[in-house]
Image: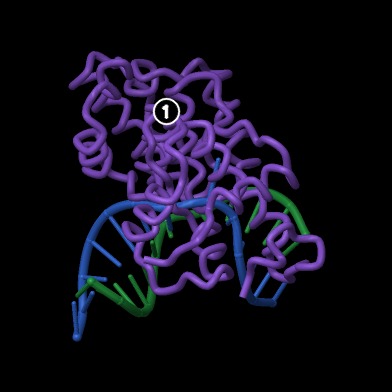
Chain colours: A purple, B blue, C green
Amino acid sequence: MPKMDLAKIYEKLLKHFGKQYWWPGETRFEVIIGAILTQQTTWRNVELAIKNLKDKELLDSHSLAAAPLNHVEALIRHTGFYRQKARRIINFSKYLVTKYDGSLDKFLDGLTEQLRRELLSLEGIGLETADSILLYAAGRLTFPIDAYTKRLCERLGIKELKYEELREFFESNLPRNLEIYKEFHALIDKLGKTYCKTKPQCSNCPLVDDCI
DNA sequence: TCCCAGGCAGGGC
DNA sequence: GCCCTGCATGGG
């Protein structure tokens, strides 16, 4: 496992970009639905879909579980892959209603590893989405590895690591602090969107000296 | 006109 | 196990 001062990287990003206050969302249910909707799409489009669901008062487990599929499809169309995403957020809501009386308090109240396995067993919730939900909705010390994080690691000289290895790397090299986990993940995304797009603008990047 | 965006699931090998 | 493909809209 590579040695790297992740805390120092975090401090540089925080100083450069400031706090990001992730995850945006008024409720934990909204956080979870947003986590599914944002897969492979921009947050801007997710906001439109969230607003549509909220305007129709469908942003709670019982309402969404009972909503017609084609109605939900139309409301979230902006997020892309809308047919499968509509099915998935409805199915998640039905699961919550059936197994936990629609209560996120009950659902999110397990041992972290057990809850993680349960999340991963649900359709449309893979590794990154499960870990984002664990961190931002359940408040667990779980570090999500997304495409930006993998890209950053490559720039820092960490290659050929699989998802679980990268997660273990972050979780064992960061202070066990929820706010740091939340902000760091958000800051890495901010970094990727700002400096590591199609044309790197390394001269202004706060990590220019850390990259290989 | 291409390529990318805060992935996931299912298939082939 | 790894690699490929479909899923789909919106913006640069």
Q: Is residue A65 left or right of residue A16?
A: left
Chain identity of mark 1: A
Q: Residue B2 appears at what percent x and percent y?
A: 64, 76
Q: Residue A25 appears at what percent x and percent y?
A: 55, 25
Query: In this figure, which residue is indicated by the disc labeled 1?
Result: A137
Q: Amino acid at mark 1?
A: Ala
Which residue is outermost to the right?
A203
Q: Residue A118 appears at what percent x and percent y?
A: 21, 37
Q: Quadrant of residue A176?
A: top left
Q: Residue at x 22, y 18 (%)?
A: A100
Q: Residue A121 appears at what percent x and percent y?
A: 21, 43
User: Dot 1: what SS?
Assistant: loop
Relative to A59, is C3 above or below?
A: below
Q: How many marks?
A: 1
Relative to A113, is A2 above or below?
A: below
Binning the other alpha carbons within 10 Å of mark 1 as few (below 14), some (14 to 19) or many (20 upward) gives many
Q: Residue at x 54, y 41 (%)?
A: A77
Q: Quadrant of residue A51?
A: top right
Q: Residue at x 46, y 20 (%)?
A: A58
Relative to A185, is A146 above or below?
A: below
Relative to A176, is A127 above or below?
A: below
Q: Residue A57 versus residue A104: which sits nearer the camera?
A: A104
Quarter occupied by the N terminus of chain A: bottom left
